[in-house]
């Protein structure tokens, strides 16, 4: 598991990301590997979505299961 938000981020759909966040999807939702949508945005080099997530309060200090933060790539 990943959430719809994780999939929207990975697919590069800023409009879908905005829509999901507008309707209450949690910006810091975590998948089974401990990845937040911000981890996905950094990994997939989705700069526009990265800005959307950060503007909506995404927490860049949340580490995944192996302790990796999305922040070093920022």
Image (tube, rainbow, N blue to C red):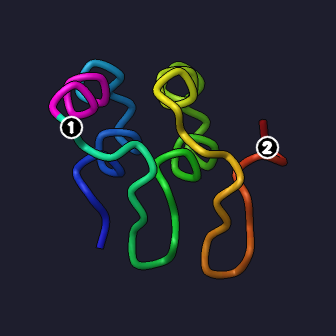
Which residue bears the numbered disc 2?
Answer: 73
Instruction: Count up the numbered dots.
Output: 2
Q: Quadrant of the C terminus?
A: top right
Establish if 44 lies above or below 18: below
Could you say where residue 6 lies in the image, as x and y percent from the top left?
36, 51
Q: Position of residue 10 (x, y in %)?
A: 40, 45
Instruction: Give the residue at mark 1.
Output: 24
Q: Is the N terminus in the top left, top right, bottom left or bottom right quadrant?
A: bottom left
Residue range highlighted in magenta: 17-23
Q: Residue at x 52, y 19 (%)?
A: 48
Label placed on residue 49? none
Q: Please give the name of the residue rendered at 61% of the width and 49% of the height, measured from the top-left corner.
A: 43
Q: Residue furthest left?
A: 23
The residue located at (32%, 46%) in the rendering is: 26
Q: Is residue 6 above or below residue 53?
A: below
How far apart are the alpha carbons under marks 1 and 2?
27 Å
21 is within the stretch colored magenta: yes
Q: The residue tagged with tag 2: helix, strand or loop?
A: helix
Drawn side of residue 40 relative to residue 63, left or right: left
Residue most extreme to the right: 72
């Amino acid at each position: 598991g990943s959430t719809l938000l994780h999939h929207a981020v990975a697919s590069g759909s800023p409009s879908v990301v905005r829509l999901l966040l507008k309707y209450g999807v949690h910006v810091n939702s975590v998948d089974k590997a401990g990845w937040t949508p911000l981890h996905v945005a950094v990994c997939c080099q989705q700069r526009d979505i990265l800005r959307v997530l950060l503007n909506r309060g995404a927490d860049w200090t949340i580490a995944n299961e192996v302790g990796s933060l999305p922040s070093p790539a920022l």
